[in-house]
């Protein structure tokens, strides 16, 4: 070996390393930045902190852009940097320090001759390191040393020597390590003392905005939103973005290429296979290839795929080495998306036929660990449909085919299950899919086949597994759904009773994990009872579901239950209650971003029917169209009858009696007759006949269905009154049960009929009193149709001053009688508000007039949003309105604005 004496006095600058070979000058040169290099100021500013701390570490995966970042920073003006690119040959201490000393001299650092030079490639004298540290410490300005690719230095002795020099050089040295892995230096001490600057993989990743600029440097113009997809796929990996950009330059459609390129057929694959995979041991390569079939993995799951026990240490090492294995926390990992794609493709080439077996092992492990969704995905990927269907049914998760965040994914997954898959679980899944599409014949056929397969099997297996009990409980759920679709309350009750018995045979933890099963079952039972006219029974079941918890898994049955409760309120004449419940139903699935068209859409039909009664006919049409556009609705008898009733009432309100009659004649197929559906259809038909001058026919239609239905009794009374039989009409109205749960939509009509009879008898005082009572009752509900349908007798009454005041602002009265000007004694100021607005309420109204949102009003008044909402409710009540623009209009009429 050749070299100079480590003691140094009288020595000259060496021209060769300790082995006598000339120094490789390229190792001291700053790497050249390509013309398309993008300088990212956020990283440069962070790197400027390297001048303030003794140690800086820039750590990232291969191709993360760390070397070019530091090189670009080092090339800045008035900055002298000693750059050394390390190599595997530097594992010998003497060789490493020889090159580092030469890097200092090459950068213009005038080291004292007393520092010396290593004479032996394998070792370095401690005294030399002490002299070097002392020389650096004596300098006025710190020397900046960059060690690139420091992950190649694996000798702990070199790391210890480097830390010794850094520590004793004090303010005279700033060390920047560019590395794929954390160095062996005592980093914890530097971190604790605040003497370390760190730039890691996450910070090195390109943002979508930076990616768009980088692509533009390559001649590719891509909007930021389009660059987001590429950044997501590459995780902002610098080399991946650049290689993709270079490849896209040769594509006739660069934007499409960047969206759809196959990673395993690009230069990206060559880079990752060479720089990452081939650097690993054969065992680690095998591990990486096998876990490429997984979205995420832990050591135990990886061991299940490799059939070894070394995954824990291997995965931890890969993560430390920034080898594109990302730590998700709690010992779970995932592969970088591009790396995973490439490894997956490489697995198929290197180990053809192994992939299905890996999926099968993963599915079994994940099922044992309770990760059902992932287990199903791997079972399907292994084409093991018997396992996959059984996993869903045995976990009591068949309800997830109907509701929850994964319902669409499960439907798509099982759509690939072929007809050759046999077994009770497979038939139950097929039955659920067909019934969810309301295909009764196919659904019941598969359900009966599943029941035959389960016949004779014991309920319990004697262990913790659910056994056939879970499958039979799934049968009961599907039977209840079939009962709902056919309008069969007896069948629904039998299914519910069977389910109650079977729940005792199923492990409690499964029932707790799947609240959607009970929620769906009660929803189907409640809907069937509703169809049969058992409104109170239905209300009890549906209220239980509406108040249950369960998050996204029960959102759909809660929406359905609220919608059916809204329908019950509408049938009983409570429009405001019906509207509130229907709107609450709409928000249940919105909160979890579930498909809006996944339920029955009854809430839309209820809102449409309410809009008709309020004479908001355009809104009613929009709501009916929205209900008809639903792509996957539950087409049960309740929905079909509700749609027909709302549509017929809209036709009637628009004066199209023929269309109203045709719609009302439509029959709804069901096992039992629904009293309310039959009654409301007859009510619409009766009103149509009345409009066409056939009161006898109208009365006859309602004679058979009015019993027990107040709305139909009132309709029959109207027909009798139109036929000139006032006494018969009053008798019918007097026969209404006192204290029944009848809302304004019924009672207002009854009051108007009594008023009409009094008016015809010449009792004008009673008539005015009853109309005033009806106006008071209808005002809060904005119930307009009864007054518009009442006939010409009511108009002179509404034109009187007291009644006009009650109608003003919410009930359109049209022009005065005969089109003339109002009488002098009727010229009165606007109706005063029932209760004066407070000062703060006036502030809110003024800002409503300025078209400010609730949030903007809150900010402007320095109050909370909830406080503004409270003021709005009070304003609406005092002004007798329910909408913002109505409140502003009313306030202007009253001179409040």
Image (cartoon, rainbow, N blue to C red):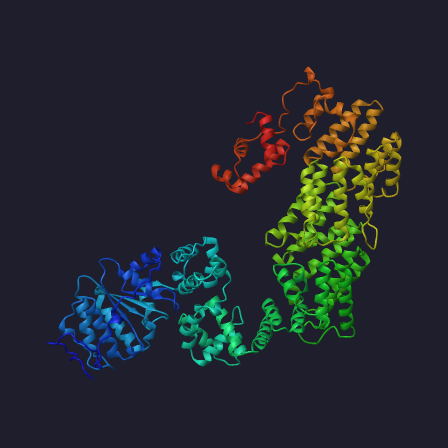
Q: Considering only vertical position in the picture, is 166 above or below 828?
A: below
Q: Considering only vertical position in the picture, is 145 above or below 664?
A: below
- The residue shown at (45%, 78%) is 284
Q: Can residue 727 be seen in this view?
A: yes
Q: Considering only vertical position in the picture, is 830 above or below 381?
A: above
Viewed as shown, does residue 730 lie left or right of 502?
right
In this rendering, the count of numbered labels is 0
- Quadrant position of residue 121: bottom left
- Residue 376 position, x and y percent, is 62, 69
- Quadrant position of residue 493: bottom right
- Residue 203 position, x and y percent, is 39, 61
- The residue shown at (31%, 60%) is 47
Residue projecting furthest to the top:
824
Residue projecting furthest to the left:
10
Viewed as shown, does residue 841 lie left or right of 318?
right
- Residue 866 position, x and y percent, is 54, 42
Observer-nearest of 129 and 107: 107
- The residue shown at (71%, 20%) is 819
- Residue 262 position, x and y percent, is 50, 66
Observer-nearest of 876 and 252: 252
Viewed as shown, does residue 53 lie left or right of 556?
left
Observer-nearest of 634 and 71: 71
Task: Identify the image quadrant of the C terminus.
Answer: top right
Q: Can residue 711 be seen in this view?
A: no
Task: Identify the image quadrant of the N terminus.
Answer: bottom left
């Amino acid at each position: 070996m050749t070299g100079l004496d480590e003691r140094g006095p009288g020595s000259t600058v060496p021209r060769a390393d300790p082995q006598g070979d000339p120094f490789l000058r390229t190792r001291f040169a700053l790497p050249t930045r390509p013309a398309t290099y993008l300088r990212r100021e956020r990283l440069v500013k962070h790197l400027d902190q390297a001048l303030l701390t003794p140690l800086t570490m820039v750590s990232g995966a291969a191709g993360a852009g760390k070397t070019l970042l530091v090189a670009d920073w080092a090339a800045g003006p008035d900055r002298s940097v000693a750059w050394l690119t390390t190599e595997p040959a530097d594992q010998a201490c003497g060789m490493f320090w020889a090159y580092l000393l030469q890097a200092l001299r090459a950068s213009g650092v005038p080291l004292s001759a007393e520092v010396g030079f290593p004479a032996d490639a394998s070792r370095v004298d401690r005294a030399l390191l002490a002299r070097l540290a002392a020389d650096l410490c004596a300098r006025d300005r710190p020397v900046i040393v960059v060690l690139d690719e420091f992950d190649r230095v694996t000798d702990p002795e070199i790391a210890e020597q480097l830390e010794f020099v850094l520590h004793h050089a004090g303010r005279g040295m700033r060390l920047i390590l560019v590395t794929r892995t954390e160095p062996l230096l005592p980093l914890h001490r530097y971190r604790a003392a605040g003497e370390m600057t760190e730039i890691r993989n996450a910070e090195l990743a390109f943002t979508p905005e930076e990616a768009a600029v980088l692509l533009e440097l390559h001649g590719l113009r891509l909007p930021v939103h389009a660059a987001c997809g590429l950044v997501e796929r590459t995780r902002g990996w610098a080399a991946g973005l650049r290689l993709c950009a270079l490849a896209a330059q040769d594509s006739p459609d660069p934007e499409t290429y960047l969206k759809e390129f196959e990673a395993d057929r690009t230069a990206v694959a060559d880079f990752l296979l060479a720089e990452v995979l081939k650097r690993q041991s054969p065992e680690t390569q095998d591990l990486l290839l096998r876990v490429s079939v997984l979205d995420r993995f832990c050591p135990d799951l990886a061991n299940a795929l490799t059939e070894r026990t070394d995954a824990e240490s291997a995965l931890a090492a890969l993560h430390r080495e920034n080898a594109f294995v990302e730590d998700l926390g709690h010992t779970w990992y995932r592969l970088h998306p591009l790396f995973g794609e490439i490894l997956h493709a490489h697995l198929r080439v290197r180990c053809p036929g192994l992939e299905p077996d890996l999926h099968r092992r993963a599915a079994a492990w994940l099922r044992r660990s309770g990760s059902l969704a992932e287990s199903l995905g791997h079972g399907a990927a292994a084409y093991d449909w018997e396992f996959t269907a059984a996993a869903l049914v045995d976990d009591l998760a068949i309800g997830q085919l109907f509701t929850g965040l994964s319902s669409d994914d499960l439907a798509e997954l099982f759509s690939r299950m072929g007809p050759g898959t046999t077994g009770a679980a497979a038939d139950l899944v097929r039955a659920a899919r067909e019934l969810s599409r309301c295909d009764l014949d196919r659904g019941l056929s598969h359900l009966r086949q599943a029941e035959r397969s389960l016949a004779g099997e014991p309920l319990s297996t004697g262990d913790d597994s659910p056994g056939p009990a879970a499958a039979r409980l799934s049968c009961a759920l599907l039977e209840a759904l079939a009962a709902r679709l056919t309008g069969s309350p007896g069948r629904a009750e039998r299914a519910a009773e069977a389910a109650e018995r079977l729940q005792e045979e199923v492990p409690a933890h499964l029932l707790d994990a799947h609240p959607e099963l009970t929620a769906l079952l009660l929803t189907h039972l409640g809907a069937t009872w509703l169809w049969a006219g058992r409104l109170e029974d239905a209300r009890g079941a549906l209220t239980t579901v509406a108040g249950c918890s369960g998050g996204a898994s029960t959102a759909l049955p809660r929406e359905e239950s609220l919608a059916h409760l809204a329908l019950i309120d509408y049938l009983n004449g409570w429009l405001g209650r019906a509207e509130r419940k229907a709107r609450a139903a709409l928000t249940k699935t919105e909160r979890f971003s579930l498909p809006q068209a996944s339920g029955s859409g009854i809430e839309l039909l209820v809102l449409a029917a309410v809009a008709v009664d309020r004479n908001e006919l355009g809104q009613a049409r929009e709501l009916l169209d929205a209900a008809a556009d639903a792509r996957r609705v539950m087409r049960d008898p309740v929905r079909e009858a509700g749609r027909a009733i709302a549509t017929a009432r809209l036709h009637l309100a628009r004066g199209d009696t023929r269309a109203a009659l045709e719609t009302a004649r439509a029959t709804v197929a069901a096992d039992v007759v629904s009293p309310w559906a039959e009654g409301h259809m007859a009510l619409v038909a009766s009103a149509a006949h009345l409009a066409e001058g056939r009161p006898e026919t109208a009365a006859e239609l309602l004679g058979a269905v009015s019993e027990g239905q107040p709305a139909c009794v009132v309709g029959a009374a109207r027909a009798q009154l139109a036929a000139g039989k006032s006494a018969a009409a009053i008798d019918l109205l007097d026969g209404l049960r006192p204290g029944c749960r009848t809302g304004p939509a019924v009672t207002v009509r009854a009051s108007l009929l009594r008023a009409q009879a009094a008016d015809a008898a010449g009792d004008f005082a009673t008539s005015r009193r009853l109309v005033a009572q009806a106006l008071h009752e209808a005002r809060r509900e904005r119930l307009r149709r009864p007054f518009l349908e009442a006939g010409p007798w009511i108009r002179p009454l509404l034109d009187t001053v007291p009644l006009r005041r009650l109608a003003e602002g919410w009930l359109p009265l049209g022009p005065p009688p005969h089109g003339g000007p109002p009488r002098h004694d009727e010229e009165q100021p606007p109706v005063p508000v029932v209760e004066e607005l407070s000062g703060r309420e006036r502030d809110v109204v003024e800002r409503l007039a300025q078209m400010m949102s609730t949030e903007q009003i809150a900010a402007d008044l320095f109050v909370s949003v909830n406080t503004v909402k409270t003021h709005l409710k009070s304003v609406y009540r005092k002004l007798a309105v329910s909408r913002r623009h109505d409140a502003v209009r009313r306030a202007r009429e009253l001179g409040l604005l």
